[in-house]
Amino acid sequence: MLVDRAVSDPRGLGDAVSLDPDARAALIRLSSGDARRALTALEAAASLATPAEGEAPAVVTTDAVAQAVDKALLRYDRQGDEHYDVISAFIKSIRGSDVDAAMHYLARMIEAGEDPRFIARRLVISASEDIGLADPQALQIAVAAADAVAFIGMPEGRIPLAEATAYLATTAKSNAAYLAIDAAIADVRAGGFGRVPVHLRDAHYPGAKRLGHGKGYVYPHDSEIGLAAQQYLPDELRGRRYYEPKALGAERDVQARLEKIRRILGGQ
């Protein structure tokens, strides 16, 4: 590793210090893949290294690294509770539309060396769960940020992550799609499903038409309005509604359109 070579190489520290394993891990986390940043932090920490007994070289500890870079963010433990606390606060700040708080927690994760792909995945989930069709572009931006991070890496990846964070935090929010799929899954798990209506069944495999599959199906595109009033849900779930859009952002238009669709479909 670069840090190890810098400790031993005569052009670097020439074994004037030894590097505590925890301090080494801290330097790697702080660098976020930036070699210059890692070497600068190592050099500063070496100057604060704790003198060892006898002839042994001084030891660079995590305290020395923390003092050198003046970042209490080293206390962010990627394997401990604070890891989950910070990502939780990040997502909840986006959900609550506090862009400044969201940016703060994003910075804490970046500086602590969090995997940027993990952050990007959480942004994609947030765009789907908390924003949905209130702003369909949110998911596109989150996915684009994830692709950008994978393409350019860090530290430049912080920029598309910040752009996506700012967009998601400041746009309209709706969890209607999230609630819809969870409600539908709950019904299925509880046994709330029946046979697919005959007219919707596949009529292309051998013997299907003899069983009446597809008979009576109305092709919506044959209608002037592109809708066909026919039963789509199984008998056991007729009239069941899962998706209830909110009058927020772009989903307001979806709400109005869906009301008309449901009236035409006769509540099916």
Image (cartoon, rainbow, N blue to C red):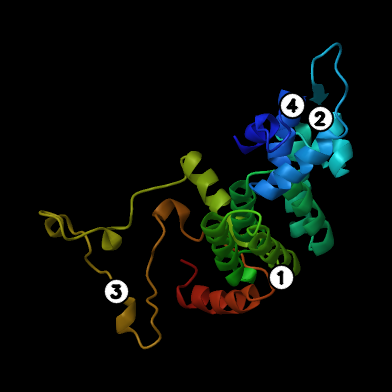
Which residue has dot 1 on it? 171
Mark 2–mark 4 Cα distance, whole angstroms, equals 6 Å
Is label 4 in a helix, a strand or a loop?
helix
Q: Quadrant of residue 2?
A: top right
In the figure, 105 relative to 27: above or below? below
Marks 3,1: beta carbons within 8 A? no
Nearer mark to the viewer, of 4 and 1: 4
In the image, residue 102 lies at what x, y percent? 78, 57
- What number is the disc on residue 62? 2
Which residue has dot 3 on it? 218
Dot placed on the residue nearer the N-terminal end, 2 or 4: 4
Indicate left or right for 241 with 236 as reference: right
Neighbours of disc 1 within 10 Å: few (<14), some (14-19), many (20+): some
Dot placed on the residue nearer the N-terminal end, 4 or 1: 4
- Going by the numbered disc 3, the residue's amino acid type is Val
Indicate left or right for 50 with 241 as reference: right
In the image, residue 149 lies at what x, y percent? 57, 57
In the image, residue 55 lies at what x, y percent? 82, 13
Which residue has dot 4 on it? 22
Q: Quadrant of residue 58?
A: top right
